């Protein structure tokens, strides 16, 4: 473990470095805050323990501590502040600046060694936790891919089933149809023979069936195309085409029937009409699914400062607390397989962010869900 000793006093620095070495760690000494910061530019400070003197001529310990926490906010760093100050207010100031621990001067070998070991254990635990979180994230991504595969497979298999069934029927009946056409094209076949060989009612019914089958096949192809387009939408960054909108009138159309509207008088609003329509319809669609057994849906719109706040709330089934952290993830869904691909909320969030806004979701199981979209008016 690297232990960085920062102290302008060469005596204190050598003493602490000796104690660090005796504890089995690598000590690297710095005589000033500036020398540490220069070194960190090339070496970084991740997985480091820093023994930091409070009083130094160029930059005092608390200030350096705050700077380290700001510059290396995501790094795994454990800072022990060293000082002869022992008042509780001083200790609180050091800890408030970002230090993890405090050791008093003059140094006690037993105390320094013990606090070093606490710091090393903490750094290792943090590293283990970060690795566990990373593994968990990877597992969640694999689970999301699995959910996507299951949902997409089910959604695509249905229209594929129609296509396969209709193609099989075509393959079975077309030979008979070709035979009839061959008779029609043969000049040596008399009209009486043709009428005796071809059932005109059956031929008419066949053409009517084929017409319906082609409509089903076209619908199936469109369904598959829609699923693929939805999947592709997550890899495409489509900029918002900003135009001035009568958002109140549009909302009345987008929300649909059975939705309670609460719209206050609105100042002019600019946004992408197509994307905002998709946003509202996605959120209302989710609310309809949540309230299919019981409950109502409300869409409200009002101004909060320079923001337009759009709120879609329902009194439906709600969402499990354990799922709230993932419902905005692409391909995550609480619906049964086949009921959706889990892209609606993540697509809605992307639209809101594409307009420079933020989206927040709260939900209580058995009571309902509220989605708040805060969008800049211009």
Image (cartoon, rainbow, N blue to C red):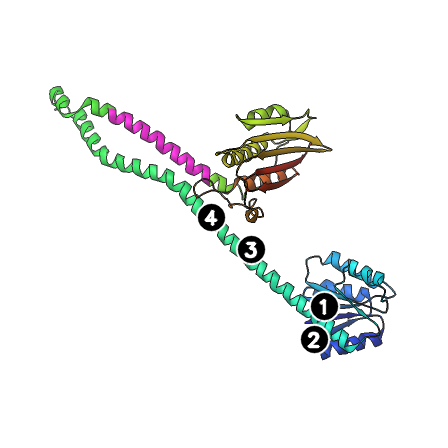
Local crowd at mark 1 within 10 Å, few (<14), some, or many (≥20)? many
Q: Is 189 placed left or right of 116 in the picture?
A: left
Circle nearer the N terminus (2, 4): 2
In the image, is residue 219 part of the stretch drawn in magenta? Answer: yes
Quadrant of the rendered image containing residue 155: top left
> Judging from the image, what secondary structure is the residue with disc 3 in?
helix
Residue beneath label 1, please?
Answer: 49
Verify whether residue 50 appears in magenta: no
Report how far apart the C-alphas of labels 3 and 2 lie in the structure: 32 Å
Residue pointed to by mark 3: 137
Q: Is residue 238 visible?
A: no
Up-down relation of residue 311 to residue 90 (above or below): above
**Which label sits on residue 25?**
2
Give the magenta-colored segment's residue range.
Answer: 205-227
CA distance separating discs 2 and 1: 10 Å
Q: Quadrant of the C terminus?
A: top right
Determine whether label 2 and label 1 are within 8 Å by CB: yes
- Disc 4 designates what residue? 147
């Amino acid at each position: 473990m690297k232990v960085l000793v920062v102290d302008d006093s060469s005596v204190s620095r050598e003493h602490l470095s000796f104690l660090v070495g005796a504890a089995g760690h690598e000590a690297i000494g710095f005589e000033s805050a500036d020398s540490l910061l220069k070194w960190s530019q090339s070496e970084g400070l991740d997985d480091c323990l820093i023994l930091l003197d409070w009083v130094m001529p160029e930059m005092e310990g608390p200030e350096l501590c705050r700077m380290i926490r700001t510059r290396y906010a995501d790094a795994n760093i454990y800072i022990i502040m060293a000082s002869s100050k022992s008042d509780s207010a001083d200790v609180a100031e050091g800890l408030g600046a970002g230090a993890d621990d405090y050791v008093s001067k003059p140094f006690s070998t037993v105390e320094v060694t013990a606090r070093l070991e606490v710091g090393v254990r903490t750094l290792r635990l943090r590293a283990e936790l970060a690795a566990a979180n990373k593994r968990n994230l990877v597992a969640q991504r694999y689970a999301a891919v699995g959910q996507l595969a299951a949902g997409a497979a089910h959604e695509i298999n249905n229209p594929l089933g129609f296509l396969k069934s209709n193609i099989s029927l075509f393959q079975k009946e077309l030979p008979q149809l070709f035979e009839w056409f061959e008779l029609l094209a043969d000049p040596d076949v008399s009209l009486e023979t043709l009428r005796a060989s071809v059932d005109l009612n059956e031929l008419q019914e066949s053409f009517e069936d084929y017409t319906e089958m082609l409509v089903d096949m076209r619908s199936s192809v469109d369904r598959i195309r829609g699923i693929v387009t939805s999947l592709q939408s997550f890899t495409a960054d489509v900029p918002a085409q900003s135009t001035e909108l009568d958002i109140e009138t549009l909302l009345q159309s987008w929300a649909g029937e059975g939705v309670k509207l609460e719209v206050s008088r609105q100042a002019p609003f600019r946004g992408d009409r197509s994307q905002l329509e998709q946003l509202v319809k996605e959120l209302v669609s989710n609310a309809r699914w949540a309230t299919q057994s019981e409950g109502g849906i409300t869409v409200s719109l009002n101004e909060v400062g320079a923001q337009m706040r759009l709120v879609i709330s329902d009194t439906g089934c709600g969402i499990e607390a354990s799922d709230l952290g993932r419902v905005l993830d692409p391909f995550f869904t609480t619906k049964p397989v086949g009921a959706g691909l889990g892209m609606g909320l993540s697509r809605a969030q992307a639209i809101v962010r594409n307009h420079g806004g933020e989206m927040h979701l709260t939900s209580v199981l058995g009571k309902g869900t509220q989605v708040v979209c805060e969008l800049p008016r211009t």
